[in-house]
Amino acid sequence: MKAVVKHHRGYGAQIQTVEIPQINEDEVLIKVKATSICGTDVHIYKWDEWSESRVNPPYVFGHEFSGEVVEKGSKVKNVDYGDSVSAETHIVCGKCSQCLTGKAHICKYTKIIGVDTRGCFAEYVALPAANLWKNPKEMLYDVAAIQEPMGNAVHTVLSGDVIGKTVAIIGCGPIGLMAVGVAKAAGAAQVIALDINNYRLNLAKQMGATSVINSKNEEPLQAVKQLTNGDGVDVVCEMSGHPIAMNQGFRMVTNGGRVSILSLPVRPVELDVTNDIVFKGITVKGITGRKMFETWQQVSALLHSGQVNVKPIITHHFSLEEFEKGFELMIEGNCGKVVLYP
């Protein structure tokens, strides 16, 4: 089969011909119908400090996808041939204290598809049946492929109450854009989107942002102060990973507010813990992955009900062989979600 392979410890990737994976008795072989590029994939493609310390080329990467079950192991009961599926990308042990107490999304022994194992930038992918999410037959493959990152947005926004609150989304990459739509659907009174990319700020408006702030053109703390009558925002969802933006997030949150951090800064970030966390009495939450499978149920319901429409975010469609175009658009920031078709 053809696949996009992270072929060396450096910039870029290659299309190569590799073996179709074999499955075990508890696994399923899936014909990939659509696969989307994630920010994590961009880290790996660019070969930054994080990817250099984490992944081991050569291997097939990619972890967001939808597809059709074409083969299943003898012990698989939860899906059948022809089912449309997506996948929870955290493969967990099921035995540690976190897994046994309903917190499998922070399993100590998590392996991530396309990071620690063979991924889905390919014609076929093999996965444990326990990780599969069955999609409605009418769901389009491109929409189904981006449920996993939408789960990140849902988990981040809904890690606390947002009804009637003012929510700031810092960083309008694809997950940040989804977070805008989720916050609006969840009843936020104001959704303020912050970025330095006008293309993505325009997408944030389409997703329901009540205000957008280009932090390159105006002072974000002053702009937020004006929008909130001097109070600051109730909730900050940090999606940028930029040290300056993260600091601004902690400074703009109101006393007693919440900061939920999904972003992955590539190096340590210095914060004023005394003044921006302790004296404010705020709640800080680190967000990883999706609650299994509570978040998936929320994502599916938001999409099925039409409360969140992700179609404006899916801005580009390419064949798998054109993956370089997709990655360059992601690096430039001139796109929403990029979907590849094997």
Image: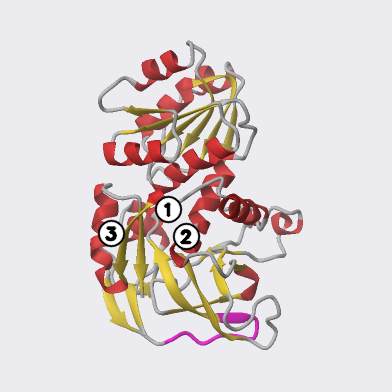
**In the figure, 289 relative to 27: above or below?**
above
The residue beneath circle 1 is 311
Please state the horizontal and vertical placement of residue 340, each as a whole percent of the image.
Answer: 35, 67
Residue 189: say if magenta. no
Q: Bin the neighbour count of mark 3 within 10 Å (Cα to Cα): few under 14, some 14-19, many 20 and up.
A: many
Mark 3 residue element: helix
**Mark seen at residue 193:** none
Tell me which corner region of the image, top left, top right, bottom left or bottom right, holds residue 223.
Answer: top left
The residue beneath circle 3 is 327
Q: Amino acid at mark 1?
A: Lys
In this picture, which residue range is highlighted in magenta? 20-28
Asked whether residue 31 is in view, the answer is yes
Whole-Å distance between the Cαs marked 2 and 3?
Answer: 19 Å
Q: Amino acid at mark 3?
A: Phe
The label nearer to you, 2 versus 3, is 2
N-terminal of the pair, mark 3 or mark 1, is 1
Residue 117 appears left or right of 256: left
Residue 255 appears left or right of 271: right
N-terminal of the pair, mark 1 or mark 2, is 2
The residue beneath circle 2 is 143
Mark 2 residue element: helix
